[in-house]
Amino acid sequence: MSSTTPNRRKRLLFAAGGVVAILVVWQLLSLVVSPVILASPVDTAVALAGLAWGSKLWIELLITLKRLAIGLAIGVAAGWVLGIAAGVEPRVRSFLEPLRWVVMTIPAVIIALLAMLWLGVGDLAVIFVVAVIVFPTMYVNTLSGATSIDRRLTEMGRVYRFPRRLMLTEVYLPGIASPTVAGLTLAAGIGVRAVVLAEVLGALSGVGHAFSRAMSYLETAELFAWIVVLLALLAAIEFGVLRRLRRRVTRWRKADS
Amino acid sequence: MIVFDRVSKSFGALRVLSDLSFHIGGNQIVGVVGPSGSGKTTILKLITGILAPDEGTVTVAEGVVGYVFQEPRLLPWRTALDNVAAPLRAQGKTREEARAAAGRWLERVELGGFEHYHPAELSGGMAQRVSIARAFAVEPRVLLMDEPFGNVDATLKSSLMDILESIIQERQTTVVYVTHELIEALRLADRVVELVPGQGLRELDLSDRGAVAREWLAGALGDLVL
């Protein structure tokens, strides 16, 4: 374990260097490009502070988070349940395949426009877009996990007459835990992009709408500030929740050095 | 105890067992030898009931079956303790009762102190010992062993066989031990039957085990004997 710590420190150092490099390049570019096109890191930070100090950032962020949470919950739950069903029963898989293909093929912006057409402008349309766009990712990952469960383990369970409940808790669910978390990670990232897209096109509130409004008024520094907010949101989900979940679910694997 | 009555089994176009009949009495230790593909594992799976014969019947007296697979087949996300405990919970024991019994069996196979290790942290031999502990922990009426030492080195195999021998001698269990190493079967078994592809089952005469072993070794070593 002690030999991995210097490696991890080195990796973090290089990552920090990468962030600094991005900031430096950004600052240098902002010196030669019009502030209407590219706000500087300093102007962005000032705009971000202004948003955070007032209530605007928190109100819009909460609205977006609410829509994201509901949309993700619906899309992830549907994808997980149907992914397992399709993994267990090939006929279900065949039945769902056309739907999966259609949803994954239609561009996200078309789904957002259809949502506006069917559900108008507001929460329902945004939640619909998130759920629909997230569903196939979760479905595909769960299906992959369900069909990859080691048949030798299920055979062992049958030999020892595991009842259905034990087969589920000892073999199936742990077996698909890793792919489920992988699917969740992807779904979260896709979900954030989907909620912003839906809000840009079809909402009068939320981070996406604020982004769109800043763009319309050429308030470039505020626009960049909202981008930082989005990145912070994704980072909080990825590093604050999903990585911990992934580590917990896969702690039985030998640690890589 | 275990009766095969004119059993046939095919997998697609491959007929693995053909009109096979034999019986194994209670508390007997029977070695089943034969080349790869002769149907040894198929016999074990028919006894467990996870495979059904295409023709004929397999009758097994009521009771719990323990199984030691060729590879350990441990749940990677569970500790050694919980791997041994899982079949006990399938029998209706509480988690605490199952873990207590599992802990005793891990001690028995000389894995005391490794209860909370996951399979990825165990060597191959240790994992196979967990598998053996699991098979015995259910207090099987019938114990099936499918080349349990096929993937371990000779030194480890010898120590594992010592453990196995001592446990089997303590218990009233019918054992069916499948191996392609006749020497292993001769060491453990009361009877040894040989599966000959295309010819069925042949019972070996064990009145002179040494002679049987020498004959087998001569066949195995072939020209090297000269």
Image: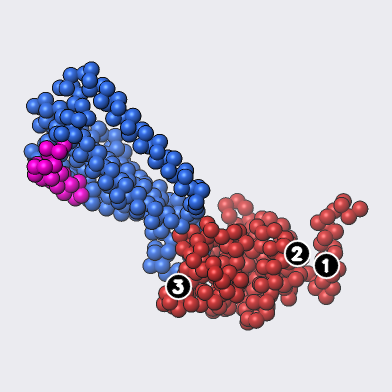
Residues flagged by tags 1 and 3 on a common chain:
yes
Mark 1 crowdedness (10 Å alpha carbons): few <14, some 14-19, many ≥20: some
Left or right: where B190 falls relative to B96: right
Residue B130: quadrant of the picture:
bottom right
- The residue at 63%/81% (across/down) is B171
The residue carrying mark 3 is: B90
Query: Does the segment drawn in magenta span residue A55?
Result: yes
Q: Nearer the viewer, mark 1 or mark 3?
A: 3
Q: Position of residue B184 (x, y in %)?
A: 73, 66
* Residue numbers of the magenta segment: A48-71
Tag 3: amino acid: Ala
Image position of A184 with respect to A167: above or below: above
Marks 3 and 2, Cα distance to the nearest angstrom?
34 Å
Tag 2: amino acid: Leu
- The residue at 8%/44% (across/down) is A55
Q: Position of residue A45 (x, y in %)?
A: 19, 34
Chain under label 1? Answer: B
Q: Identify by letter the chain in red.
A: B
Mark toward the start of the polypeptide (1 vs 3): 3
Q: Among all residues in the image, which is located at the extreme right? A: B226
Mark 3 crowdedness (10 Å alpha carbons): few <14, some 14-19, many ≥20: many
- CB within 8 Å, label 2 to label 1: yes
Tag 1: amino acid: Val
Q: Position of residue B205 (x, y in %)?
A: 81, 72
Chain under label 3? Answer: B
Mark toward the start of the polypeptide (2 vs 1): 2
